[in-house]
Amino acid sequence: MKDRKVVCRCEDLTEEEIIHAIELGYDDLESLKRFTGATTGPCQGKGCLMHIIRILSQKTGKSVDEIGVTTQRQPVNPVPLYILAAKKGDEK
Amino acid sequence: MIRVAIVGGGIAGLSAAYFLARKGADVSVFEQKYLLYGASGRNSGGLTAQFVNEPLIKLALRSLELYDRIQTETGFNFLLRKDGYIKIADEKNEDALKNEVDFQKKAGVNVRIVDPDFVRNLFPDINTQTFTAAAYFADGGVVFPWPVIWGLAKGCRELGVKIYDYTPVRVEVKGNEVLGVRADSELHKADYVINAAGAWSNEISRQAGIELGNRVFREEICVTESLKPYLDPYILDVSTGVYISQSMRGEIVGGILGKEAEEVSVKSSLDFLTAYARRVTELVPKLRGMSILRQWAGAYDVGRNGMPVIGTTKVKGFIQLNGFGRNGMSLALAAGEGVAELVLKGKSRIVQPFNP
């Protein structure tokens, strides 16, 4: 068990599982994210994105710049619905 | 061997590729971004056959059968659950919903009108003051769109389909016949080119010299943090356009029916989030304290007359397979199967009504 390297706590993903997905052919960041679920859990990538990029870079030989980052989605931090319901939108 | 080039790596293009390859065609799929980019990876996965004309209902019922079959054939779990699809309506929209259900029943859809209490039995947190009637389609449900695409792609690859992602192409036509598609400088020759480019279909069609005129829409969705599974069916409020369901990961996935857009866009807005928050907290007051984790948008196209566009065109070998609107997940598997039949046998009954 000491070899189990967890890279995404939200989705409980290990380094080995990320590597397995890359070997299956999900070797670009957007596809890898969706296939493994990494960056889509409660932390929204804050804890795992850099690990995923590192592993992808090590496995494919692509530079971090070439790999890029996933689209950053609002909100930056989770916002409760009752707060949003009280706010006006961006056009008003 | 018939060579087919498919433009678009979403559910429509991959379904056509899958069924063509099963019958021995030589198929290549070209996707400008990554598989599922435009709409197939951005929707809420609602599956229904509650449509207002028979050809659409036939596509939807056939697609529901195909989901079961393709999961087995490809050995891939689509995380599909048939826990029902419910449309709810207020007093103003109640009559229209009832008329729709009468028609659907005659067309063989297992749908019925139920009262708000029936819906509350399925989902105790719903506010029954917000609607007066509901249409319950027991065979509908929710699918996770991503594994549908991964599974189709896996099935395609095992059948020898070549899938090129991050590969934009141009359709090449000579005289009145397709030559194939050009990616970078390389021409991939094909007897048939299938335009399954979703929101980008107008542009691809124009390359073949055909004005398609599909309307482009943008639709926004968001998810909350995860809850224990407790919302089984998919619920669409036809009065406000708000819909919600719960994913297998526990998130409440919700959105508002899309709006026509000037251009293809997948930008998110705060306007959506605030409008959604107001409506969904009326519908399900207990969600008030739940947090939104993430929002996004998808782009899709709707045929000129509001119907999908499927079939041959005046350019020999150029085939349309687009315009599914927000119902691609419900319709496109059967449409892909139909197009495969059209290419290999010259005609297909199920897609014939959608001939451009």
Image (cartoon, rainbow, N blue to C red):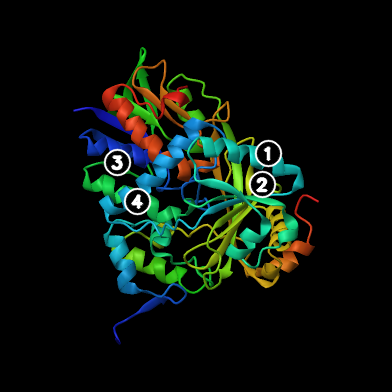
The disc placed on residue B96 is 1
- Indicate the position of residue B159 as horizontal and vertical percent values: 22, 44
At a point 38% along the width and 78% down the height, the residue shown is A6
Protein chain holding label 4: B
Mark in front: 2 vs 3: 2
Asked if residue A52 lies left or right of residue B292, the reply is left
Mark in front: 1 vs 4: 1
At a point 30% along the width and 72% down the height, the residue shown is A16
Mark 2 and mark 1: Cα distance apart in space = 10 Å
Query: Are the residues tagged 2 and 3 within 8 Å (C-beta)?
Result: no
Q: Nearer the N terminus, badge 1 or badge 4?
A: 4
- Indicate the position of residue A40 as horizontal and vertical percent values: 49, 65
| Type of amino acid under label 3 | Tyr
| Type of amino acid under label 1 | Ala
Residue beneath label 3, please? B18
Residue beneath label 4, please? B68
| Type of amino acid under label 2 | Val
Q: Residues within 10 Å of mark 4 (few under 14, many from 20)?
A: few
Residue beneath label 2, please? B238
Q: Nearer the N terminus, badge 2 or badge 3?
A: 3
At a point 42% along the width and 54% down the height, the residue shown is B146
- The quadrant of the picture occupied by the N terminus of chain B is top left
Q: Secondary structure at mark 2?
A: loop
